[in-house]
């Protein structure tokens, strides 16, 4: 199952997704927003309505920070304190959904996300998170609709985020062509996104265009620090192309700089695909 990494402005899978045996249900489904407005600013950008909401906001933001560093139990305590202060505070329900999703308590997560969306159906953060939750449950078409709703909000600061998550969802549904489109759109929205560029290279590789994947990874390593996963993907692309010098360079990096990584173990085992 795909897992998430959480922060106040980022929810996206942190590792390469393998192919999925599920049918590609989203290929013929246009990513039409499930909510058509009027859009308002994300609730996280709005001032609290009253003192109770102000207290709830403080504890919700603390909970998000704790969840981002893996302190799930403390995050759950903060979410409960927030809801004790203001039971209808939608961002606290959103936080609960993220926590329960991390704990794989799916029924509770779904209920929490729906409660948040019930208060703010156009909120981009809520839609992005619920879309990611639905993708993890194999409900791909519904997930894409929520990603599209998040992207469509004109006030959203993080346009690349739902596009990357949509691309990852399409990869999970074994649709690398659709994923490539989403990652390219994410890169258009945020040219500085290392994640969008890496995932674009991965989707292109999955489609068998090894030359373009190789070139995208050269671009990636010129602009960003290499990671074990980017070096591993570059090695595999170079190997497919017969680029022995590049393959050797990537191999040395993986064995040296990233020794002990899962990718290094795959190299040692000769498991290139």
Image (spheres, rainbow, N blue to C red):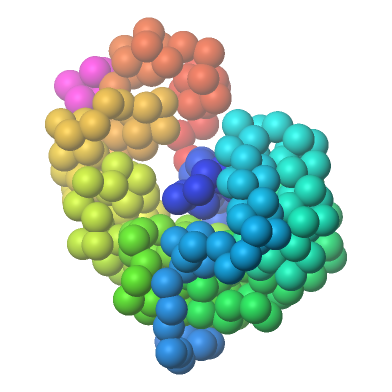
Q: Exactly how many numbered labels are in the figure?
A: 0
Q: Who's the residue at 31% across and 68% down the image?
A: 181
| Residue 209: image location, x then y, percent | 26, 55
Query: 118 above or below 236?
Result: below
Q: Residue furthest front?
A: 51
Q: Who's the residue at 39% across and 76% down the image?
A: 153
* Residue nearer the viewer, 30 or 104: 104
| Residue 127: image location, x then y, percent | 55, 71
Q: Is residue 130 visible?
A: yes
Which quarter of the picture shows residue 76? top right
Query: 144 above or below 64?
Result: below
* Residue nearer the viewer, 114 or 3: 114
Secondary structure of the magenta portion, mostly? helix
| Residue 189: image location, x then y, percent | 24, 62
- Is residue 3 rendered to the left or right of residue 174? right
Residue 266 lies within the magenta run: no
- Is residue 42 rendered to the left or right of residue 130? left
Which quarter of the picture shows residue 23? bottom right
Query: 228 above or below 36?
Result: above
Which quarter of the picture shows residue 204? bottom left
* Residue nearer the viewer, 205 or 64: 64
Q: Is residue 205 visible?
A: no
| Residue 89: image location, x then y, percent | 69, 65
* Residue nearer the viewer, 235 or 83: 83
Q: Who's the residue at 35% across and 34% down the image?
A: 230
Q: Who's the residue at 67% across and 46% down the image?
A: 59
Q: Which residues are magenta?
A: 243-249
């Amino acid at each position: 199952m795909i897992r998430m990494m959480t922060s106040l402005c980022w929810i996206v899978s942190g590792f390469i997704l393998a192919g999925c045996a599920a049918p590609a249900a989203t290929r013929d489904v246009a990513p039409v927003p499930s909510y058509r407005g009027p859009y308002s600013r994300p609730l996280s950008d709005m001032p609290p309505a009253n003192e109770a909401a102000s207290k709830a906001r403080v504890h919700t933001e603390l909970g998000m920070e704790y969840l981002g560093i893996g302190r799930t139990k403390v995050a759950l305590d903060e979410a409960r304190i927030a809801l004790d202060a203001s039971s209808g505070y939608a961002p606290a329900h959103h936080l609960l959904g993220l926590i329960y999703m991390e704990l794989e308590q799916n029924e509770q997560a779904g209920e929490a996300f729906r409660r948040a969306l019930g208060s703010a159906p156009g909120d981009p953060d809520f839609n992005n998170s619920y879309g990611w939750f639905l993708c993890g449950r194999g409900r791909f078409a519904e997930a894409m609709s929520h990603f599209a709703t998040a992207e469509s909000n004109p006030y959203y600061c993080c346009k690349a985020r739902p596009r990357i998550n949509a691309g990852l969802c399409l990869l999970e549904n074994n649709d690398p062509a659709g994923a490539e489109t989403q990652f390219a759109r994410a890169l258009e929205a945020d040219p500085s996104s290392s994640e969008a560029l890496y995932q674009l290279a991965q989707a292109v590789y999955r489609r068998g265009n090894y030359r373009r994947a190789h070139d995208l990874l050269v671009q990636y390593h010129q602009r960003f620090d290499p990671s074990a996963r980017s070096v591993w993907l570059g090695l595999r692309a170079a190997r497919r192309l017969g680029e022995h010098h590049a393959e050797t360079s990537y191999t040395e990096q993986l064995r040296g700089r990233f020794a002990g990584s899962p990718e290094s173990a795959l190299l040692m085992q000769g498991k290139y695909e």
